[in-house]
Every structure is written in structure tokens, then in C-alpha cells.
Image (cartoon, grey):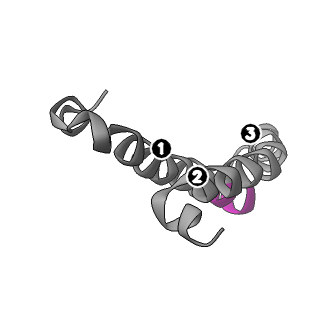
Amino acid sequence: MSSCCKKAPKSAFDNLYLTQSAKVQQAAWAIHKGYAQDGTDPALQQIAGTAVPVLENELTTGKSLTPSGLAGR
């Protein structure tokens, strides 16, 4: 857990955690998508390509749980 989450007041912890989680999911998606398109190892490209739709689904779900995503509901 990052130090900012440890210092967050209990009332803000969930929002902070979900916001940071969405950022991590975005980074994971970008890494996999990039490797699926431009990777040098065909087997790893295939694995990354298979993971992209799963990560996109998780990213969409994660973003919908962030404070800005919840505001749109």
C-alpha cells in the first residue's frame, strides 16, 4: 500500500484507493497493448494481446468506481 493511502483519513481512503487502482489498471493496459502491437517475441505478443480485452474490461469497471465515474451515474 502506498504511503499516501496510509496517511489518508478513513473517510477518503476508499476514493483514494479506487483512484490509484484505476491508474495502475491504465498502466497495465498500456503496457500490454503496446507489447501486443510492437513486441519482439511472438509468443509474448500473443499473451499480451489475449490480456488486452480482459484489462480493458477491468479498466472500464475500475474507472466506473472512481469518484469521477460515480458522479456520472
Instruction: Categorize mark 1 by other alpha carbons within 10 Å: few (<14), some (14-19), many (20+).
Output: some
**Residue that badge 1 annotates:** 21
Location of residue 8 with respect to 23 vertically, above or below:
above
Q: Amino acid at mark 1?
A: Ser
Q: CA distance from mark 3 to mark 1?
A: 25 Å
Q: Amino acid at mark 3?
A: Leu
Give the number of the disc on residue 35.
none
Region in magenta: 33-38
Q: Residue at x 77, y 51 (%)?
A: 57
Q: Nearer the viewer, mark 3 or mark 1?
A: 1
> Which badge, 1 or 2, comes first in the chain's sequence?
1
Residue 25 in the image, given as x and y percentages of width and height:
56, 48
Q: Nearer the viewer, residue 73 or 38?
A: 73
Disc 2 is placed on an element classified as helix
> Which badge, 3 or 1, comes first in the chain's sequence?
1
> Which badge, 2 or 3, comes first in the chain's sequence?
3
Q: CA distance from mark 2 to mark 3?
A: 31 Å
**Residue that badge 2 annotates:** 65
* Residue 6 shown left or right of residue 44 in the figure: left
The question of residue 16 being in magenta is answered with no
**Residue that badge 3 annotates:** 44
* Residue 7 shown left or right of residue 41 in the figure: left
Which quadrant holds residue 26? bottom right
Disc 1 is placed on an element classified as helix
Q: Amino acid at mark 2?
A: Leu
Disc 3 is placed on an element classified as helix
Which quadrant holds residue 14? top left
